[in-house]
Amino acid sequence: MRLASEIELSEFLKSVEKRAFKRSVYHVRNEESALDIVQDSMMKLAEHYGHKPVEELPMLFQRILSNCTLDWFRRQKVQNALFSNMGDFETSNEDEDFNLLDTLNASNNSDQNESAESLTERAQTLRDIEIEIQDLPARQREAFLMRYWEDMDVAETAAAMGCSQGSVKTHCSRAVHALAQALRAKGIKL
């Protein structure tokens, strides 16, 4: 195996940029955050793994992107936990009309129409899906993520995984069936 040159590393990053951004937007539902996640992932790959063989870059990048996404969710969880107890913000007697929740809602013009319950349910469902994906056998997980989250076609996935297109289809089919069965067992209907 030969090591990746700077040009090959650069070409690889260009080739995965759009798919990685699409995957990140799907996860975090915020384009600016998704862009940050992808940029962090690319920088980490270049800094820590740029010396690896070209064939290893796709899987390394996928793992780094997943970890950066999980780190983003962890930071959001901490940030949300800090502000979840609005009762800590007592109002003084002189300004009883002030309501922190109204102020936050007025300043936030994004799509906050979803109830806290539905946001929590969706977050839990996504967590359950991620856990089940992590529990898949390595090759099934790899094929599933490339095909359905990275939006790679069968030939691209087969090339990245170093196997036949038929193997990719088999791995994906088994992954989908295993995920569907595991999620149904948890009462999740997609």
Image (tube, helix red, strand yellow):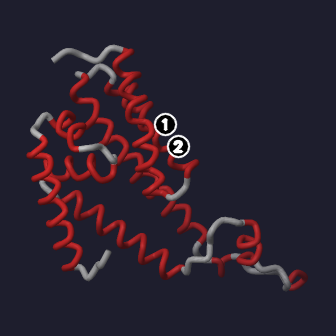
The residue lying at 16 percent from left, 73 percent from top is: 181
Secondary structure beneath disc 1? helix
* Three-letter code for the amino acid on which mark 2 is drawn: Leu
The residue lying at 36 percent from left, 22 percent from top is: 9
* Three-letter code for the amino acid on which mark 1 is drawn: Gln
Q: In what quadrant of the picture does the C terminus appear?
A: bottom left
The residue lying at 58 percent from left, 74 percent from top is: 84
Which residue in the protein does label 2 denote? Answer: 35
Circles 2, 1 touching at the beta carbon (< 8 Å): yes
Near-viewer residue (181 or 157): 157
Q: In the picture, residue 122 is in which quadrant?
A: bottom left
Is 33 on the left-hand or right-hand side of 15? right
Q: CA distance from mark 2 to mark 1?
A: 6 Å
Near-viewer residue (162 or 36): 162
* Residue 31 position in % (x across, y down): 55, 50
Other-residue count near label 1 (Cα within 10 Å), few / some / many at <14 / 14–19 / ≥20 = some
Q: In the picture, residue 188 is in which quadrant?
A: bottom left
Which residue in the protein does label 1 denote? Answer: 39
